[in-house]
Amino acid sequence: MKSFLIQEIQFSSVSKSVRCCGILNMGNLSLSTSLRIDFGQLNVLLNKISRTTDSDQLYACLKEEVTEEGTYYSMNLESQEIVPIALGELNQETHYGLRISA
């Protein structure tokens, strides 16, 4: 089973996708990766995380940066005790674009 331990979430008002950074676990293999999801999947993801983590603590991690191009948001979740999430739980029909971080 593939699971993903989320460490950071990044999104903006000018993009249709969300970047999630973390550790992908596949059996005995663990990779630092990022994956792109849409805002519907972000909603599912945040709902799953908020079941095990206090919502106030979760949203306290949200940082906002306003630029001429738009508003950028990031959530650093490394200090939170986030449970790894099975990739299939986000959306059964989506193929994830995974990228190994250097």
Image: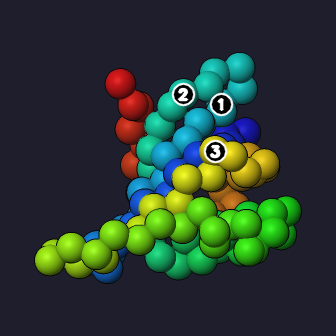
For the residues carrying marks 1 and 3, which lies nearer the camera in this image? Answer: 3
Q: Residue at x 73, y 39 (%)?
A: 1
What mark, if any, has residue 61 been given in the picture? none
Specify whether residue 80 is in view: yes
Mark 2, Cα crowd under 10 Å, few <14 / some 14-19 / many 20+, is some
How far apart are the alpha carbons under marks 2 and 3? 16 Å
How far apart are the alpha carbons under marks 1 and 2? 8 Å
Considering the numbered disc 2 on the image, is that residue within a helix, a strand or a loop? strand
Q: Amino acid at mark 1?
A: Met
For the residues carrying marks 1 and 2, which lies nearer the camera in this image? Answer: 2
Nearer to the camera, 64 or 7: 64
- Left or right: where does residue 41 sit relative to residue 1? left
Q: Residue at x 55, y 53 (%)?
A: 76
Task: Count all numbered tags in the image, as a single digit.
Answer: 3
Percent across and percent down for residue 83 are 78, 49
Considering the numbered disc 3 on the image, is that residue within a helix, a strand or a loop? loop
Q: Residue at x 45, y 50 (%)?
A: 35
**Label 1 with label 2: CB-CB less than 8 Å:** yes
What mark, if any, has residue 26 been given in the picture? 1
